[in-house]
Image (spheres, grey):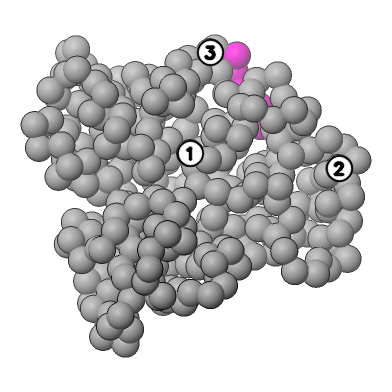
Amino acid sequence: MGRLSPIQDRIRELADEKDVLILAHNYQIPEVQDIADIVGDSLVLAIKATGTPQSTIMFCGVDFMAESAKALSPEKRVIHPVPGSRCPMAHMVDSESLREFRAGYPGVPVVAYINTTAETKAEVDICCTSANAVKVVASLESDKVIFVPDSNLGLYVQSELPDKEIILWPGYCHVHSDITVEQIEALRNEHPEAKVLIHPECTMDVIRMADKVASTEGMITYARESPAREFIIGTEEGLVYRMRKEIPDKAFHPLENAICPNMKKIGIEDVLKALEEMGPTVGLDPEIIERNRPPLERMLSL
């Protein structure tokens, strides 16, 4: 971590004073990443949210992440600095539509990508993240699985588990779906020695170009351990800041315009205001919390 600005110093003082753990997703802006206690992907942050001694969790990410933290640690206050920071893909499926859909497939388990709302998670059997989606689906005895909401991630899981029938929900992440083969080819022509790292929310034609398909955390691990010296990063550009910071002796090439505007809604001033006011807080119905815990805990047990 470099030298912090006065507002960042004040945030760290308040967080320590008020017993607040600050979690930030890899796609957050650099100023927010720099004041977080932990920066990571959805799986890392979900795990950290369950074991923290702090009485309050501040989640700098999109809405479903803060909801999952509340479901896993209902006794804690969970602050989401900007409630309008919402994941569009998470809202492409709702609980009522999912109940109707799964009624057509009696007995078929439902796997929900963690990028879903708490109400949707209450209707599913187990959750997954991009880091463990293949492992989660493989763990199920059924030869058929309903996968919501990300059809691209579901297709990737299908390619890894050909003996399973993956029944897809038609959702997608617009940032990853907009990444094209032409973009990857152009960067590879500029950097012929670079390894291509692709997130599994991308389309299959892009995934086929990868030297490594991985979650954001998996990309960091791969880059750190690889003998390669440069990498093309096929995911939201926020990850590149963390990679350059933590692995300064290697080169990382982001994709132009791979930006999630919803992840960028949380500014450093929003974090300070939320700490001063200890809100906005995440509120979930106790019944929803109880119905969210089993699918989330089944995922974490793997």
Rounded to the nearest angstrom, the CA distance separating label 1 from label 3 is 20 Å
Toward the bottom, the furthest residue is: 190
**Dot 2 crowding, Cα within 10 Å, few <14, some 14–19, many 20+:** few
249 displayed left or right of 111:
right
Image location (x, y in percent) of residue 166 = 16, 33
Count how many numbered circles sit on residues in the image: 3
What amino acid does circle 2 point to? Answer: Asp
Callout 3: SS? helix
Q: Nearer the viewer, mark 3 or mark 2?
A: 2
Q: Amino acid at mark 3?
A: Glu
x, y percent for residue 215 = 39, 50
Q: Label 1: how many residues lie within 10 Å, few (<14), some (14-19) or many (20+)?
A: many
The span shown in magenta is: 281-286
Which label's residue is closer to the chain start, 3 or 2?
2
Q: Quadrant of the N terminus?
A: bottom right
Name the residue beneath numbered marker 1.
Answer: 43
Q: Quadrant of residue 116?
A: top left
Q: Is residue 249 magenta?
A: no
**Who's the residue at 25% across and 29% down the image?**
137
Q: Is residue 282 magenta?
A: yes
Query: Residue drawn 50% across and 47% down?
Result: 41
The one nearer the camera, 53 or 80, is: 53
- Of residues 104 and 221, the one drawn nearer to the viewer in this rendering: 221
- 29, above or below 97, in the image: below
Q: Are marks 1 and 2 in contact (CB under 8 Å)?
A: no
User: Residue 213: x, y in percent?
Assistant: 29, 55
Disc number placed over residue 68 in the picture, else none: none
Residue with the mark numbered 3: 290
Which badge, 1 or 3, comes first in the chain's sequence? 1
